[in-house]
Amino acid sequence: MIESCSKKRMIIAIACLIGLSVLVLIIENELAPSDTRPHTHTTPHPNVTQREMCWIREEIEELEECQPCTALETQSGSPAVCSAGRYRQKIKCIKTGVVFRKCDRVVWLEEQHFWIFEGVMSVVGLVGCLATVARQRVLDHRVVQRIQRQVAAGV
């Protein structure tokens, strides 16, 4: 069945599938909740004080998105949540003030990893496509040469 499709129809079908995939990704991004996983800061770390656990018992305001801890913050243990985890989020508790809490994902970093993966897979697909086209040309050239030899031999 697929052999009977022309090159133009195949390109149109592939373009439609790519467009549909992009549309699904856009719709899914808009409809999905922004934070589906709970934060994993319910287990206190020995270096984290009760003041820094204020987000459990007080109203909070998020001042920053979840960010990766720098190497300096991890080595020095300041803020204390960086010694307990890889990511931190700056929040403001209503009574206590500004503190950091541990979080388990960085949205922009995950998006960056996703697009890097998509780019690599696109390059791999393109290389595979070019290799297939080149191989098909070689095979077609061999068939034409064989036919020319047969015609020249008078068969």
Image (cartoon, helix red, strand yellow):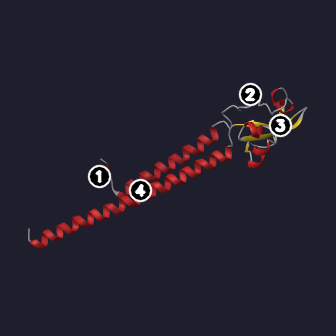
Q: Please tell me which residue lies in front, 44 or 94.
A: 44
Residue at the spot x=72%, y=38% of the render?
Answer: 85
How many angstroms separate mark 3 from mark 4 (CA)? 49 Å
Left or right for 15, reference 83:
left
Q: Which residue is mark 2?
A: 43
Work out whether mark 2 precedes mark 3 in sequence or the reverse, and give the earlier one: 2
How many angstroms separate mark 1 from mark 3 (CA)? 61 Å
Q: Which residue is mark 4?
A: 128
Closer mark to the observer between disc 2 and disc 3:
2
Closer mark to the observer between disc 1 and disc 2:
2
Q: Please tell me which residue lies in front, 92 or 81.
A: 81
Within-10-Å neighbours for mark 3: few <14, some 14–19, many 20+? some
Q: Which residue is mark 3?
A: 61
Closer mark to the observer between disc 2 and disc 4:
2
Closer mark to the observer between disc 3 and disc 4:
4
Marks 1 & 3, CB-CB < 8 Å contact: no
Within-10-Å neighbours for mark 1: few <14, some 14–19, many 20+? few
Left or right for 141, reference 50:
left
From this viewpoint, which residue is outermost toward the right? 95
Q: Is residue 98 above or below residue 137?
A: above
Residue at the spot x=54%, y=48% of the render?
Answer: 22
